[in-house]
Image (spheres, rainbow, N blue to C red):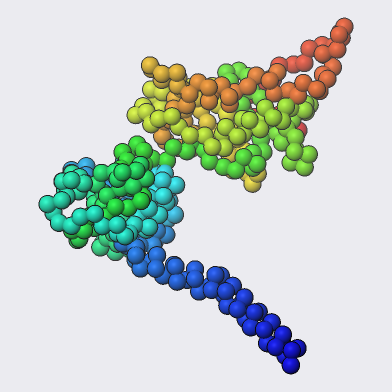
Amino acid sequence: MIRERVWVSGALLILAVLLIIGWEKGLKPRRELKQEQSSQTFSSLDPKSAKKIEISRGEKKDILSKHDNSWVVETDQGYPADGEAIDKALAAAKKLNCNQEVATGESDYPRFDLEKDKALEVKIYGGSDKPVTDFFVGKRGSTYDSSYFRKADDQKICLAYENLITSFDRTNDSWRDKNILNFTVTDCKTLTSQDGATVLWLDKDLKANKWELLEAQNRKLAATWAVDGICQTLAKLKTQGFPMTPPQDAGIQNSTKKITVTLVGGANYTLIVGSPSKGKDNYFVKREDVPAVYELTQWQVNSLFKKRDELVEKLAVEPNSQKGSTAAPAPETPPVPAPPNK
């Protein structure tokens, strides 16, 4: 009898544990998700299906549109848009809810800068001409990460704990994609650096994970940390501004200062450095395959172009470095924009 009671008690305990686990792992999250979705102001908004965003204040309007899988600033001559900023803005719109209603009625709009001619209106479109979302953003709430908003067809004024002002209230320039180059740094395979008549070729031995400097028929061990630093700078290179300067006025067309990176797989990019921009310690630069002119700081440019002595591994003893050596000096690197024979 006692043994049966023990078995029954143990079975009930196991069942209780399984029910708790099932609740915590399955039923509870689904219930919370349904509650969260039901409280969303725009529950039908699917950020992945968004095709166009219109942001207007008064007569000023910015239009962002999606072509294939890339966003562009339609009101800025189709300039590539900052996809990461758009993803954050769409996520903020998706999470909007009116759990905290602070007022109702048009008479209260001025208190929160939510009049139609003063507030920021945001319309997000999917596959039709009717917007999936249409709401107005007013002033910031009591904290930096809060904002007042209202739906276009509703007089309720809500406080959202989302930074809607930072997410949506931008200029054309700040919607532009600031990336000049954007690739995985470990894919950096070869570098060709030309500065005037000096051309340096660097190649990475992927198996040994070491860089080598190519000179004529020779290979010299390069300072891996120095070359990797160049690759790291190139991989996430961002512009310091968007100068409205054509290439012919930016010193690009006749420039002899450029660097080419070739990635694993064969893709390659060439960055051309032009003249200094007036009034700034910046330089005009341009990707060879992109029409836009960008700006980099002098520090960024200097970090990309290193002298030969800075790139050669100091532990590698070269024949001419031994004291008393009578060997003839090594020939200069040929000033031609093609790699030497390996």
In the figure, residue 257 lies in which quadrant?
A: top right
Q: Residue furthest left?
A: 107
Work out whether residue 273 or residue 186 is closer to the camera in this orientation and state it.
Answer: 186
Q: Dividing the image into 4 quarters, which one contains the C terminus? A: top right
| Residue 16 at least partly seen | yes
- Identity of the residue drawn at 44% across and 25% down: 284
Work out whether residue 58 or residue 92 is closer to the camera in this orientation and state it.
Answer: 92
Q: Residue furthest top?
A: 324
Residue 289: x, y in percent? Answer: 48, 37
| Residue 135 at least partly seen | no
Residue 292: x, y in percent? Answer: 41, 34
Work out whether residue 149 or residue 141 is closer to the camera in this orientation and state it.
Answer: 141
- Identity of the residue drawn at 27% across and 49% down: 148
Q: Above or below — where is 205 with respect to 20? A: above
In the figure, residue 316 lies in which quadrant?
A: top right
Q: Above or below — where is 53 with respect to 218? A: below
- Identity of the residue drawn at 41% across and 70% down: 34
Residue 181: x, y in percent? Answer: 52, 38
Residue 234: x, y in percent? Answer: 56, 34
Q: Above or below — where is 41 with respect to 197? A: below
Q: Residue furthest front?
A: 2
Total marks shown come to 0
Q: Dividing the image into 4 quarters, which one contains the N terminus? A: bottom right
- Identity of the residue drawn at 31% across and 38% down: 171
Work out whether residue 228 or residue 103 is closer to the camera in this orientation and state it.
Answer: 103
Image-based side of 40 in relation to 314, left or right = left
Q: Above or below — where is 166 with respect to 150? A: above
